[in-house]
Image (cartoon, rainbow, N blue to C red):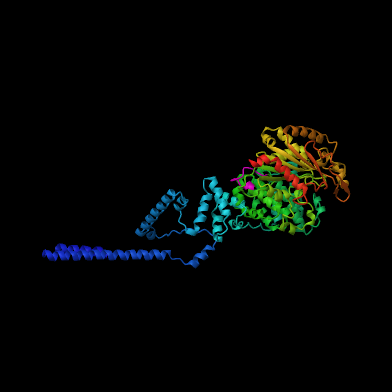
Amino acid sequence: MSLAAYCIICCRRIGTLTPPPKSTTYRRDIRNVIKFTGSLILGGSLFLTYEVWALKKSLTLDTQVVEREKMKSYIYVDSVSLDDRENYGITYQARKELHKAVRKVLATSAKILRGPFADPFSTVDVEDHECAVWLLLRKSQSGDRAARLQAVQEMSETHHWHDYQYRIIAQACDLRTLIGLARSKESDPRFFLPPPPLPSLKEDSSIEEELRQLLASLPQTELDECIQYFTSLALSESSQSLAAQKGGLWCFGGNGLPYAESFGEVPSATVEMFCLEALVKHSEISTHCDQIEANGGLQLLQRLYQLHKDCPKIQRNIMRIIGNMALNERLHSTIVRSGWVSILAEAMKSRRIMEASHAARTLANLDRETMREKYHDGVYVLHPQYRTSQPIKADVLFIHGLMGAAFKTWRQQDSEQVLTEKILEDEARYTTCWPKTWLARDCPALRIISVEYDTSLSDWRTRCPVERKSIAFRSNELLRKLRAAGVGDRPVIWVSHSMGGLLVKKMLLEASKKPEMSTVINNTRGIIFYSVPHHGSHLAEYSVNIRYLLFPSLEVKELSKDSPALKTLQDDFLEFAKDKNFQVLNFVETLPTYIGSMIKLHVVPVESADLGIGDLIPVDVDHLNICKPKKKDAFLYQRTLQFICETLAKDLEN
């Protein structure tokens, strides 16, 4: 302002003066021009100096404050001043336009150079050390699926960030990215926020009572007999437990016959197991999953999971429920928001195969970005459990037999003599599941699945006394679950032990009758039978004690040598297998098996294990150990590996 006023005054003076001589006027004009120019230069210099000083001041940071801020676990957002003078002043507007111009230049140069900075820098200004974090976040939410997968992989492989940077990802990423990180082997645990605080229990209530109320809130009509049995047992026993706790007395009455086998257990934990087993059955029904979620079941199960860290059986049943709920995509966001992903990510890294496999099943059901398959209860992927760039070219399925399980059937021999601590220290020396450790390393291009279903020797010990599941019924049930898991989309080899081999035969025959199952037949390459009683077993003729003699289970009855159903199954399958040219390998035990303390029995004799096609190899072990190699270089495992590699040779090469 002063500069402009000075110029006006000078002009007025020049205009009002009488014309002097020409020489004097010329010198005076030069003097005025010098004064005006000097003033202009001086004023401009002062203005530029002030701007430089202001800019330097605004960019001067207290590094200690920055370091302290980096340790905080929240997202930083630029604050907007509410002062209108600052927001709408000439200086603000000028700087805003300048920043817009700079962003346009950056965006244009990025497009020209095909750099990744065009989109992020057009909407957000970040510090240099934050660029990688926000670029990966932006990339993980891209419309391009390949870009999203690459972003998640890059995040999981990053191990040099500060704690606050991992927390930025944890708070800002979407559901797909979080699940992808949980299914990435190398992901840092700091990517996962701890579960939100759980709601307080109601006054004068306990977890056991809350569990009972959750179970009672579920529909009790139009259920199959087994679900009704588990539900009524859990509700009746929990009622007795609550009455005993309030009255100071515990009673083993009612339907609680299972207590007679475990007097030493804490009654409340036993009742919780009954409730959880009933909830497992209910969670197999889609509409019941909605009820469980609506009634706070996710939070209640999480509380129970945290309380029973020393009880793997309770934790596994809880995982089964969450895994069943994850089959319903409409519940995915609720499961994630309730904090289950962080729990599952931790369980995935467990060295205990059962715990890791249950968590892997649940996360696979949540992962709709890379998975088309859905894994129902009892179908467990042993390899690969994480996302992998390794192409999967074939499937190998393991089906256990009578009284077996998805994991323990396929453990290494002599497990009882090895301490758990030693097992965890060295899986190369001992494995609790050789398909997961040995076979997965020898054949990484295989997807290895193990199946679990309930069996019993006697109706006295069946988990559901009203359940009468024949081989035909079980085969249809398993076939449906396996097809949902994508079995049949790739070449398949079936590996079975004992009664599991009969299930495999029945499943393949049933699949051949259904057009929608044709891919299962067309892609079956071979079958391995470990002591499968194709022609029956002596087991049905003996018993451990009187209760087995009086009440043999339906499974045992079907194994008798004179069973018409067994003979029909054998004849039909032999003709079918020859027609399809299936490759077959048979192993058979040569040593008797001790059943309990009273009976020593040759469960499957050599003549019964002979399918009629394929090699028949006798092995000097009993029925239980025929599928449990002593070590990795043992003949039993090496011959199995050789058969798998030779049968799938062409498929693995492609």
Q: Is residue 306 above or below residue 361?
A: below
Quarter of the figure that contains the N terminus: bottom left
- Where residue 526 appears, as percent x and y from the top left, is 72, 39
- Where residue 336 appears, as percent x and y from the top left, is 60, 51
* Count of all numbered marks drawn on residues in the image: 0
Residue 429 sits in quarter: bottom right
226 on left or right of 36: right
451 on left or right of 46: right
Q: Can you see residue 428?
A: yes
**Which residue is rendered at x = 70% and y = 45% of the image?**
449
Residue 611 sits in quarter: top right
Magenta-colored stretch includes residue 271: no
Using the image as rendered, state which of residue 272 and residue 408 is in the foreground.
Answer: 408
The magenta region covers 364-375
Q: Is residue 113 above or below residue 50?
A: above
Q: Is residue 311 above or below residue 585?
A: below
Q: Can you see residue 221?
A: no
Quarter of the figure that contains the C terminus: top right
- Where residue 562 appears, as percent x and y from the top left, is 85, 36
Magenta-colored stretch includes residue 371: yes
Using the image as rendered, state which of residue 103 and residue 495 is in the foreground.
Answer: 495
Q: Is residue 22 above or below residue 621?
A: below
Using the image as rendered, state which of residue 477 and residue 185 is in the foreground.
Answer: 185
State the predominant SS element of the stretch in magenta: loop
- Where residue 36 appears, as percent x and y from the top left, is 23, 64
